[in-house]
Image (cartoon, rainbow, N blue to C red):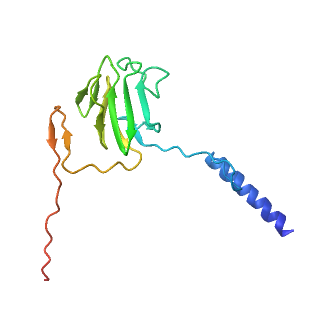
Amino acid sequence: MRAPLLLLALVLSVTLATAATGAPIALAKGAPVAPEKTVWGRLIAANGVGIELSKPSIVVGSSPAADAVLADRTVSPQHARLTYADGRAFLEDLGSKYGTLVAGSAVKKGDKPRPIAQKTDLAFGAVSYTFEFGVRPALIPPLQALPTSKGKTKAATPKTAPAKDTKPK
Protein backbone atom coordinates (compact mmCIF):
# COMPACT_ATOMS: atom_id res chain seq x y z
CA MET A 1 0.00 0.00 0.00
CA ARG A 2 2.92 2.31 0.67
CA ALA A 3 4.41 1.98 -2.88
CA PRO A 4 1.30 3.31 -4.71
CA LEU A 5 1.21 6.32 -2.36
CA LEU A 6 4.87 7.10 -3.10
CA LEU A 7 4.21 6.83 -6.83
CA LEU A 8 1.20 9.14 -6.52
CA ALA A 9 3.29 11.65 -4.54
CA LEU A 10 6.01 11.56 -7.22
CA VAL A 11 3.52 12.12 -10.05
CA LEU A 12 1.89 15.02 -8.17
CA SER A 13 5.22 16.70 -7.41
CA VAL A 14 6.34 16.44 -11.07
CA THR A 15 2.97 17.76 -12.27
CA LEU A 16 3.10 20.69 -9.83
CA ALA A 17 6.71 21.49 -10.73
CA THR A 18 5.88 21.46 -14.43
CA ALA A 19 2.81 23.66 -13.90
CA ALA A 20 4.80 26.12 -11.76
CA THR A 21 7.69 26.55 -14.20
CA GLY A 22 5.94 25.89 -17.49
CA ALA A 23 8.92 23.81 -18.61
CA PRO A 24 8.66 20.13 -19.45
CA ILE A 25 10.64 17.81 -17.21
CA ALA A 26 12.39 14.74 -18.58
CA LEU A 27 11.64 11.62 -16.54
CA ALA A 28 13.38 9.09 -18.77
CA LYS A 29 16.66 9.12 -20.61
CA GLY A 30 16.21 10.60 -24.08
CA ALA A 31 12.91 12.33 -23.24
CA PRO A 32 12.56 15.77 -24.84
CA VAL A 33 13.44 18.79 -22.75
CA ALA A 34 12.78 22.35 -23.89
CA PRO A 35 16.07 24.15 -24.60
CA GLU A 36 16.89 27.04 -22.30
CA LYS A 37 16.84 30.47 -23.91
CA THR A 38 20.08 32.33 -23.31
CA VAL A 39 19.49 36.03 -22.77
CA TRP A 40 22.74 37.74 -23.75
CA GLY A 41 21.53 41.27 -23.15
CA ARG A 42 18.71 43.60 -22.15
CA LEU A 43 17.58 47.05 -23.19
CA ILE A 44 16.33 48.80 -20.04
CA ALA A 45 14.05 51.85 -20.36
CA ALA A 46 14.05 54.70 -17.83
CA ASN A 47 10.90 53.23 -16.23
CA GLY A 48 12.72 49.93 -15.63
CA VAL A 49 10.88 47.96 -18.32
CA GLY A 50 13.27 45.83 -20.34
CA ILE A 51 13.52 44.03 -23.65
CA GLU A 52 15.39 40.72 -23.52
CA LEU A 53 17.88 39.99 -26.29
CA SER A 54 18.31 36.28 -26.96
CA LYS A 55 18.87 35.84 -30.72
CA PRO A 56 22.44 36.39 -31.99
CA SER A 57 21.16 39.21 -34.23
CA ILE A 58 18.26 41.49 -33.17
CA VAL A 59 16.64 44.05 -35.47
CA VAL A 60 15.23 47.02 -33.55
CA GLY A 61 12.49 48.97 -35.30
CA SER A 62 8.89 50.13 -35.46
CA SER A 63 7.82 47.38 -37.87
CA PRO A 64 5.86 44.44 -36.42
CA ALA A 65 8.41 42.24 -38.22
CA ALA A 66 11.28 43.66 -36.10
CA ASP A 67 12.67 41.47 -33.32
CA ALA A 68 12.41 44.34 -30.81
CA VAL A 69 9.43 46.56 -31.70
CA LEU A 70 9.57 50.19 -30.54
CA ALA A 71 6.28 51.92 -31.28
CA ASP A 72 7.50 55.49 -31.74
CA ARG A 73 7.28 57.77 -34.78
CA THR A 74 11.02 58.56 -34.53
CA VAL A 75 11.95 54.88 -34.82
CA SER A 76 12.33 53.59 -38.39
CA PRO A 77 10.73 50.26 -39.40
CA GLN A 78 14.20 48.62 -39.42
CA HIS A 79 16.17 51.11 -37.36
CA ALA A 80 19.26 49.29 -36.03
CA ARG A 81 20.75 45.85 -35.44
CA LEU A 82 22.20 44.53 -32.18
CA THR A 83 24.49 41.51 -32.52
CA TYR A 84 26.24 39.27 -30.03
CA ALA A 85 29.39 37.32 -30.90
CA ASP A 86 32.26 35.93 -28.84
CA GLY A 87 30.99 37.53 -25.62
CA ARG A 88 30.77 41.03 -27.13
CA ALA A 89 27.78 43.11 -28.21
CA PHE A 90 27.67 45.43 -31.23
CA LEU A 91 25.21 47.96 -32.66
CA GLU A 92 24.85 49.17 -36.24
CA ASP A 93 22.42 51.61 -37.84
CA LEU A 94 20.30 50.24 -40.70
CA GLY A 95 19.61 53.59 -42.37
CA SER A 96 17.34 55.14 -39.76
CA LYS A 97 15.75 58.53 -40.44
CA TYR A 98 16.17 60.00 -36.93
CA GLY A 99 19.51 58.42 -36.02
CA THR A 100 21.07 55.99 -33.59
CA LEU A 101 23.35 56.95 -30.70
CA VAL A 102 25.80 54.90 -28.64
CA ALA A 103 26.91 56.74 -25.49
CA GLY A 104 25.86 60.02 -27.13
CA SER A 105 27.89 59.36 -30.30
CA ALA A 106 26.05 59.07 -33.63
CA VAL A 107 26.19 55.80 -35.55
CA LYS A 108 25.55 56.13 -39.29
CA LYS A 109 24.50 53.54 -41.88
CA GLY A 110 27.61 51.97 -43.37
CA ASP A 111 29.72 52.53 -40.23
CA LYS A 112 31.49 49.52 -38.80
CA PRO A 113 29.32 47.88 -36.08
CA ARG A 114 30.00 49.79 -32.84
CA PRO A 115 30.96 47.74 -29.76
CA ILE A 116 28.74 48.39 -26.76
CA ALA A 117 29.68 47.82 -23.15
CA GLN A 118 27.76 47.21 -19.92
CA LYS A 119 25.50 50.13 -18.91
CA THR A 120 25.94 51.95 -22.26
CA ASP A 121 23.20 54.44 -23.12
CA LEU A 122 21.61 53.80 -26.53
CA ALA A 123 19.10 55.93 -28.44
CA PHE A 124 16.92 54.82 -31.35
CA GLY A 125 15.44 58.09 -32.63
CA ALA A 126 13.94 59.71 -29.51
CA VAL A 127 13.66 56.39 -27.61
CA SER A 128 16.43 55.80 -25.04
CA TYR A 129 17.57 52.60 -23.35
CA THR A 130 20.50 51.43 -21.27
CA PHE A 131 22.19 48.24 -22.46
CA GLU A 132 23.00 45.53 -19.92
CA PHE A 133 24.58 42.15 -20.53
CA GLY A 134 22.43 39.16 -19.60
CA VAL A 135 25.51 36.93 -19.55
CA ARG A 136 29.04 37.68 -18.48
CA PRO A 137 30.68 39.88 -21.13
CA ALA A 138 34.05 39.07 -22.64
CA LEU A 139 37.01 40.63 -20.92
CA ILE A 140 38.03 43.93 -22.49
CA PRO A 141 41.72 44.77 -22.69
CA PRO A 142 42.45 47.49 -20.08
CA LEU A 143 43.96 49.98 -22.56
CA GLN A 144 41.20 49.79 -25.16
CA ALA A 145 39.93 53.21 -26.28
CA LEU A 146 36.45 54.00 -25.01
CA PRO A 147 34.03 56.41 -26.72
CA THR A 148 33.13 59.57 -24.82
CA SER A 149 29.82 61.41 -25.02
CA LYS A 150 31.39 63.94 -27.43
CA GLY A 151 32.35 61.27 -29.98
CA LYS A 152 36.06 61.40 -29.16
CA THR A 153 37.95 58.53 -27.65
CA LYS A 154 39.98 58.34 -24.49
CA ALA A 155 42.28 55.61 -23.31
CA ALA A 156 40.90 53.57 -20.46
CA THR A 157 43.35 53.48 -17.58
CA PRO A 158 43.33 50.73 -15.01
CA LYS A 159 42.57 51.89 -11.49
CA THR A 160 44.89 50.69 -8.79
CA ALA A 161 44.06 50.33 -5.14
CA PRO A 162 46.08 52.40 -2.68
CA ALA A 163 48.96 50.54 -1.09
CA LYS A 164 48.18 49.04 2.31
CA ASP A 165 50.43 49.61 5.28
CA THR A 166 51.94 46.21 5.99
CA LYS A 167 54.05 47.20 8.99
CA PRO A 168 53.03 45.54 12.28
CA LYS A 169 51.66 47.94 14.88
Instruction: Let me know if residue 107 appears in the view.
Output: yes
Give left or right: position of 104 versus 28: left
Give left or right: position of 30 versus 108: right
In the figure, residue 107 lies in which quadrant? top left
Q: Is residue 69 above or below residue 166?
A: above
In the rendered picture of this protein, how many numbered marks are placed on residues? 0
The picture places residue 105, in percent across and down from the top left corner, at 22, 30
Quadrant occupied by the C terminus: bottom left
Q: Name the residue located 33 percent from the left edge and 36 percent from the top edge.
A: 90
Give left or right: position of 50 versus 101: right
Quadrant occupied by the N terminus: bottom right
Q: Which residue lies furthest to the bottom in this view?
A: 169
Q: Is residue 59 above or below residue 141?
A: above
Q: Name the residue located 19 percent from the left edge and 34 percent from the top edge.
A: 149
Q: Is residue 65 above or below residue 33?
A: above
The picture places residue 11, in percent across and down from the top left corner, at 75, 56
Query: Which of 137/134 is in front?
Result: 137
Q: Name the residue located 66 percent from the left edge and 51 percent from the top edge.
A: 25
The picture places residue 57, in percent across and down from the top left corner, at 43, 33
The picture places residue 125, in percent across and down from the top left corner, at 32, 22
In the figure, residue 86 lies in which quadrant? top left
